[in-house]
Image (cartoon, rainbow, N blue to C red):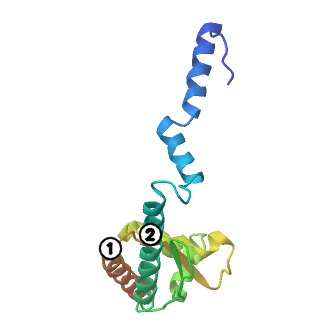
Amino acid sequence: MHLTNIDKGVHDVLHKLLTVQQCPSIVGQVGLYSLVSPPQNGEPSYDSFQREIADISHNYKQVAKILSTELNKVVGFNCSQPEGGPVVFTKFKIPQKAVDEAEVQGTAPDIFYGLELLETMGISVAVGSAFGLSPTQHYMRLSLPAKVEDIDKLVVRLKSFNQQFLEKYS
């Protein structure tokens, strides 16, 4: 930090304040320690920790399977069964009229689709072109909802948007 015409004492206090803000809080430090040092076999919370990990993993697998199945029911979507992780990737078709409009706006077609999805439905996705994938094939990555019950709401909104988008650009 460079300050001009500022008293050294004030400079030192500002430097100290900025330095303190860069340090994680005690809660953050304890959370990180817990993450990198999970309970070991024989410790009191080990069994509880293992159950929680198994429950979370099972829930993600269940949500991923249901979401990918439901996404495959959306017109023009093709979603493979995810193998792991809290996301699903789906391939989708974009009408040529939308591809042309994206070109006019100077953006990739999948970004064009993703921005309209965000603006219209509030659904944020990561698009394939952001990962350097082919500009002629369109992909998006969706984060999994935490609960199975939230899948229906997501898919209904996604189907509605996709239908409107196809009608507008077909």
Q: Tag 1, which secondary structure? A: helix
Horizontally, is 103 left or right of 76 in the view? right
**Residue 164 versus residue 21: which sits nearer the camera?**
21
**Residue 107 versus residue 15: which sits nearer the camera?**
15
* Vertical relation: 163 (above or below) 24: below
Please provide percent x and percent y for residue 144. Answer: 45, 72
Please provide percent x and percent y for residue 109. Answer: 57, 77
Where's the N terminus, which quadrant? top right
Q: Quadrant of residue 147?
A: bottom left
Circle 1 crowding by C-alpha within 10 Å: few under 14, some 14–19, many from 20: few
Q: Tag 2, which secondary structure? A: helix
Residue beneath the point at 51% across and 54% down = 43
* Vertical relation: 137 (above or below) 47: below
In this figure, what is the number of numbered marks? 2
Please provide percent x and percent y for residue 130. Answer: 63, 69
* Vertical relation: 157 (above or below) 48: below
Q: Nearer the viewer, mark 1 or mark 2?
A: 2
Where's the C terminus, which quadrant? bottom left
Marks 1/2: CA–CA distance: 16 Å
Answer whether residue 7 is visible to the viewer in this image: no
Residue beneath the point at 47% across and 39% down = 27
* Vertical relation: 28 (above or below) 168: above
Provide the residue designation for mark 2.
Answer: 56
Give amino acid for label 2: Ile
The residue furthest front is: 42
Q: Quadrant of residue 96?
A: bottom right
Give amino acid for label 1: Asp
**Residue 151 versus residue 25: which sits nearer the camera?**
25
**Residue 120 versus residue 28: which sits nearer the camera?**
28
Provide the residue designation for mark 1.
Answer: 150
Please provide percent x and percent y for residue 46. Answer: 49, 59
